[in-house]
Amino acid sequence: MSERSSMPLIEVVNLGVRLNTSRGPAQAVRGVSFALKRGETLGLVGESGCGKSVTALSLMGLLPDSASVTGSIKLDGGELAGLSDAEYCRLRGNRISMIFQEPMTALNPMHTIGNQVAEPLRRHRKFSASQARREAIALLDRVGLPDPARRVDAYPHQFSGGQRQRVTIAMALACEPDLLIADEPTTALDVTIQGQILDLIADLVEERGMSMILISHDLGVIAENVQRMMVMYGGTIIESGPTDEVFRRMGHPYTQGLFRARPRLGARKGTRLTTISGTVPELADLPSGCTFADRCPLVMEQCRAALPAMVDVGPGHFVRCIRTDVSMAERVGALTV
């Protein structure tokens, strides 16, 4: 194995992001650390408001100007935190690309899809207009858009939701990035199209040897598409490890709650889904202790005193909980999808 392939492609150390909100400063991300080698895939899972998308936007340099970022983000050993927007523009769409969860807002309604797919090729690869157009057609064909040579000059509103998502994938992959971030890329699509899009992304990632970070609230999607996963809650990682290991031995009560809340095939009509009581805490008003304490069935006074440290519970498997002995004894078992 070469030295280049053994080193992390992306390395995040103690990442913190503070946002200014109407309720005051909010610590949207707290102490997030992870590393990803070339060709590896990582999933981020959790409810809305847990910090998943903010973490991804930090890697892309797309946070609001008022955001305060601490910690380190390195790409191939080069520090990204603190880069100017001009420096980040040379990376975005080139070495790091992102598929956003709502394609209609990710695409510019005033420009043809061909021009939008061709733009990163002209900006980063210095292709001529004719070269970029030919490559755009080839990319649209690769992502399964019907009759791309004829439809390359059409506008986003002339496509279905699934077709628009294919266009955004073509845009993200145009320059063959080292790292692809997919932020809930199938949220707006029906189940059949979801499967097609996820299979397409997986095929392209493997074909081009890219690393991928897949963000989802769907445990089934995570189980089938990534090698490692991190569960986020209250802006921090509360469980991480190899995907199979995490699902086999869920150590955090929140991870177990997400698993119990998933829809089940064959459930009797009218059966109510299991829910996690309470709501995600406001980022501007996070507790000093475990962020899940107010919703946790195993909470004790010590949980509220300080944010628990990560506990090693298995090969590469870590849980941020002081009651892992109890929670893992009550784990719900292996995932079935």
Image: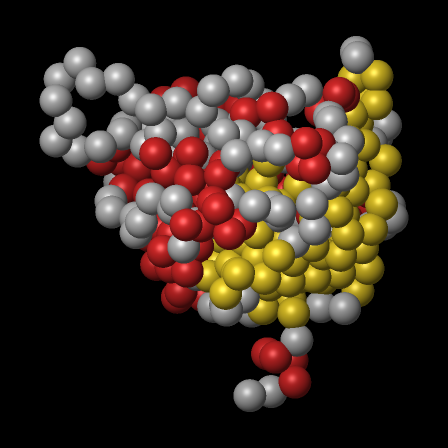
Colour scheme of the rendered structure: secondary structure
Please identify the residue farthest to the bottom as the structure is shown: 1
Instruction: Tell me, yes or no, if residue 133 can be seen here.
Output: no
- Asked if one can make out residue 300 in the rendered structure from this viewpoint, the answer is yes
Q: Horizontal placement of 271 versus 30: left or right?
A: left
Q: Residue at x 80, y 55 (%)?
A: 72
The one of 9 and 320 positioned closer to us in this rendering: 320
Q: Is residue 298 above or below residue 156?
A: below
Residue 40 in the image, given as x and y percentages of width and height: 50, 65
Q: Residue at point 76% right, 21% down?
A: 284
The quadrant in which the N terminus is found is: bottom right
Q: From what the image shows, is residue 308 above or below residue 269?
A: below
Q: Is residue 331 left or right of residue 175?
A: left
Q: How many marks?
A: 0
Percent x, y of residue 25: 84, 23
> Residue at point 44% right, 50% down?
328
**Based on the displayed image, in which of its 4 quarters is residue 177 positioned?**
bottom right
Give x and y (percent) for residue 5. Answer: 59, 78
User: Nearest the camera: 312 or 200?
Assistant: 312
View extreme (top): residue? 22
Which x, y percent locates residue 228?
48, 58
Residue in view at x 33 percent, y 44 percent: 332
Q: In the rendered view of the protein, which quadrant contains the C terminus? A: top left
> Going by the image, does 167 lie left or right of 192?
right
Asked if 236 appears above or below 324 in the picture, the reply is above
- 247 vs 160: above or below: below
